[in-house]
Image (tube, coloured by chain):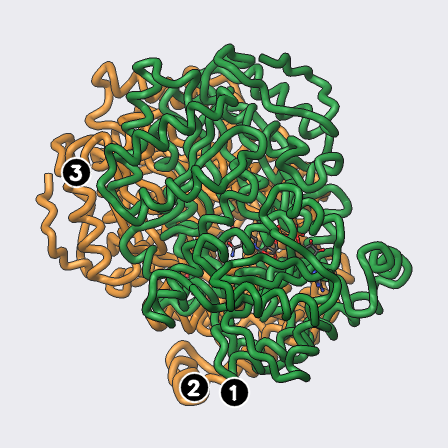
Chain colours: A orange, B green
Amino acid sequence: MFIVYNNIDHKNIHAPHGNILNTKGWSQEAALRLIINNLDPMVAKDPENLIVYGGKGKAARNSKAFDKIIESLKELENDETLLIQSGKSVGIFRTTRESPRVLIVNAQIVPRWATHDIFWDLEARGLTMFGQMTAGSWIYIGTQGVLQVTYETLNALARKIYHSDNLDGKWFLSAGLGEMGGAQTLAAKMNRCTSIIVEIDIEKIRRRLRDKYLDTYTDSLDEALKLKDESIKNGKHLSIGLLGNAATVYNELVNRNIIPDIVSDQTAAHDINLGYVPEGYDIKSFQKFREDNPEEFKRRVYESIVREVNAMIYFKNHGAAVFDYGNDIRTRALEGGLKNAFDIDGYVPAYIRDLFAIGSGPFRWVALSGNPDDIYKIDDAIIKNIDDRHLTDWIKLAKEYVHFQGLPARICYAPYGERERIGLMINDMVKNGDLEAPVAIGRDHHDTGSVASPYRETEAMKDGIIINNQAAAAKDLYNKIIGNYIQEG
Amino acid sequence: MFIVYNNIDHKNIHAPHGNILNTKGWSQEAALRLIINNLDPMVAKDPENLIVYGGKGKAARNSKAFDKIIESLKELENDETLLIQSGKSVGIFRTTRESPRVLIVNAQIVPRWATHDIFWDLEARGLTMFGQMTAGSWIYIGTQGVLQVTYETLNALARKIYHSDNLDGKWFLSAGLGEMGGAQTLAAKMNRCTSIIVEIDIEKIRRRLRDKYLDTYTDSLDEALKLKDESIKNGKHLSIGLLGNAATVYNELVNRNIIPDIVSDQTAAHDINLGYVPEGYDIKSFQKFREDNPEEFKRRVYESIVREVNAMIYFKNHGAAVFDYGNDIRTRALEGGLKNAFDIDGYVPAYIRDLFAIGSGPFRWVALSGNPDDIYKIDDAIIKNIDDRHLTDWIKLAKEYVHFQGLPARICYAPYGERERIGLMINDMVKNGDLEAPVAIGRDHHDTGSVASPYRETEAMKDGIIINNQAAAAKDLYNKIIGNYIQEG
Ligand SMILES: NC(=O)c1ccc[n+]([C@@H]2O[C@H](COP(=O)([O-])OP(=O)(O)OC[C@H]3O[C@@H](n4cnc5c(N)ncnc54)[C@H](O)[C@@H]3O)[C@@H](O)[C@H]2O)c1
Ligand SMILES: NC(=O)c1ccc[n+]([C@@H]2O[C@H](COP(=O)([O-])OP(=O)(O)OC[C@H]3O[C@@H](n4cnc5c(N)ncnc54)[C@H](O)[C@@H]3O)[C@@H](O)[C@H]2O)c1
């Protein structure tokens, strides 16, 4: 067990392990371990600045706010509720034992002012926080989360486009090996697909080589294409990192009329100020450019994004399966003047909504003990007791391929009814002392009624752009089984 | 007691009275009686179309949705929660006895699409509903609600501008005698102030004469001014309805250089399509104009609003206390091209925020029995037991002046701690059988942490335009004492 200090050095923190409480109950303890875990250097992208993943997605507003949250969680009674507003604790209320222990709401702005410029200005002035999807709700579990949904997306694509349950003999072009994007290579390999992923930052490539998400890398497109051809010829599923700029590489392929089978992008294009490196710059020089001349920088970012999306549309028109993977790159291209940016499909309506339609969605759990055996025991119990081939196949693949980051965790897509069954099963295991400590259960944004995002989760739905506010209204109903804190995008 | 039918004729409904349940518990019963009460012809503006007050503020999406809500409330168990989404029941979930019985969220749209045009288009297609402030949350109690806050606003103005606790010898010019606006005359009188209120609809004037909110009326400005002068000379506080168009009357006063002491407006200017009659039209011809030529109609509405607000600025520059009373008329004038529309103060920062600062805010309760004695007994208990002169003075005035509409109700502004005290007192009275039936407790939008409205509740606050999402996050904490359903704007 680790002692939690009030004044944590959050450059190098790790969630407490074991089964001794630092707080007044396991719900509070879950929240405490999860927020710390989200800033563990093994998990977070930039813990010093409290950034967990996805551009500037943070777990707390600033260091002081983080310390205060920890302090509040340690004080919190079992009939109280802590309110968190955009990464800051704003109050503790007496409620009931059945109430949520923690309620989190992030980054809400009155619609008329809800623009990028105003949001990032407020953020710079410390008045709000970008919570991404799971950072600000403390349920980020590292690359495994996105690995699973990327796996499901490519798997659904295989079924829909190639009428096969794998992608043998195909190749996948994408960009970005960041916190989430790094999962693309492994998700491709699990679907027996060769991949080339363009990344501008050599450090990101090195990290993915180290943790074996990437098999090899090169800074030459010719070399990458050669490796890809050999991989396919030999029935292999190599993952190849290509050091370079996505806009440049995609257009070079267009010039050579080389059409990949599958194309996407996972640069952090949603964040126009920080997420996308314009052509002609490297990871260092782009930072300086941005500081020296933010307006010109933005113009250049838009220019490159337009060029990249234009190439993606070319691939699509020449037979490739091309999809936007939720980083808003189509919207940025449209803002940049590319009128037909939305010719590209969104991955939700194109591929994974079929899963939502049967109630299948993300279900994730974290071993608060820090003990990997707790997760493996649950894996085994699922494989033994749950009669769902698609799900148990995934659990087996995950057991083989996934390296835990920070607190051990598992995610799977469980359909209607199965989440409850797995939750009750875990409940029993905790009760019977099979596990070292309780387990926190959560979910993410890929789910029915979770997020109203017209170009992602709710794209092309019948009621169009209305927020289906079940998400907000159903707060009380999530995570009832064990975890007792509530997440909201 | 009335029996509640599944298929209610909602043109002429009244909440069940007495202490026999139509549902499985008093929380459900409170919700059921309140939604019906909100559509009682004595309470609602246009019950046939489910409109309660404030432009098109509705209690339910449509008749079918209303019937379904009634049905759901009758089925709802004591450990279940009913979710209402923009006037439609969308699900019943098993929760706990301590959970809210009903959760309501209205009119949420993803910010980029949150414009008037898109909202009203969605509304017309039955995909959302405008819930106003208390209509969509079923806690509207008729004119008394706005009477109280208008009383407080004028009272605060008297103290701040005239260093007096009344407005003896002053006169107040305003417009609109609708559901909310009708309260202006009585609020002025309670502050010993003479008033002229311009209203375009003779029916509204008649209604206010009938219920004694208005003392007299005329269709001549000269006559109105004469009556006003006599009232002031004789130390009276006459309320005068003036049949006419606010833009026209205000500008005529400017032409004559007659400057009122206090000026405001309570036409439903927030709703550009329905709330404001343009100059040159009466209450009938404007409807036809709107249907025949909606674009030209809108242009004319903007034109009149700009003229009216321009006159208000003139009054301000010539010494009057002029305030926007929350109907967004400044925003509409700005949209219509009047650059300095925001020279006029908002009533919250100008006058009543001082009350919020000491935790004082709206506290309202409704006798579910339908028995006025229940309210009078609580009035007396407050006068006897609560040691707060400002509050007990108001209760005495309310007892004298307020006519109940639908279920008897009371509202007062109670500061921090006092709401709890009054709530517990009511609790005891219910427990001891002093009252015929339980009492529903609610609040409205004039409160700390209730609504983020940059030109009303949160105008000129330090953190500017950010939604202080305590409002959403604190859902669980409202109405805990007796009422157990949750309202949100
Ligand atoms: N669909 C989903 O489920 C899902 C899930 C997570 C994230 N996302 C989105 O995916 C995006 C990526 O997330 P992340 O956490 O990996 O972000 P990240 O910031 O960690 O990584 C982005 C990577 O892109 C690289 N990059 C930037 N510009 C480039 C360019 N022009 N060429 C090549 N490489 C470039 C950066 O060096 C960085 O490594 C985000 O926009 C995020 O919102 C979608
Ligand atoms: N500050 C607050 O607490 C508060 C409270 C309630 C309502 N409001 C706002 O006040 C406004 C009025 O609410 P309401 O419920 O009384 O609305 P309403 O629709 O019932 O009444 C509006 C009245 O204005 C009259 N009118 C319209 N145009 C006119 C014109 N040009 N000249 C003269 N009269 C005209 C209409 O005939 C109608 O009687 C709304 O915008 C509402 O949002 C503010």
Determine crowd level at label 3: few under 14, some 14-19, many 20+ residues with C-alpha closer than 10 A.
some
Please, which chain is the residue tagged with disc 1 on?
A: A
- Ligand 1 closer than 8 Å to label 2 CB: no
Q: Nearer the viewer, mark 1 or mark 2?
A: 1
Give above or below for B447 relative to A338: above
Q: Tell me the kind of residue under disc 3.
A: His
* Rendered location of residue B428, percent (x, y): 29, 21
Q: Quadrant of the N terminus of chain A?
A: top left
> Which residue is found at the position 32% from the left and 69% from the top?
B163
Give above or below for A312 relative to B317: above
> Which residue is found at the position 88% from the left and 56% from the top?
B288
Cβ atoms at labels 1 and 2 below 8 Å apart: yes
Q: Earlier in the sequence, mark 2 or mark 3?
A: 3
Give the spatial CA distance, label 2 vs label 3.
43 Å
Please, which chain is the residue tagged with disc 3 on?
A: A
Give above or below for A62 relative to B38: below
Give the numbered dot on residue A289: 2
Which residue has dot 1 on it? A296
Judge from the rendering whether residue B398 lies leftward or rightward of residue A33; answer left or right.
right
Judge from the rendering whether residue A57 lies leftward or rightward of residue B425; answer left or right.
right
Please, which chain is the residue tagged with disc 2 on?
A: A
Task: Between residue B160 and residue B193, name the one nearer to us.
Answer: B193
Q: Earlier in the sequence, mark 1 or mark 2?
A: 2
Q: Tell me the kind of residue under disc 2.
A: Phe
- Ligand 2 quadrant assignment: bottom right
Which residue has dot 3 on it? A17
Q: Secondary structure at mark 2?
A: helix
> Which residue is found at the position 67% from the left and 70% from the top?
A334
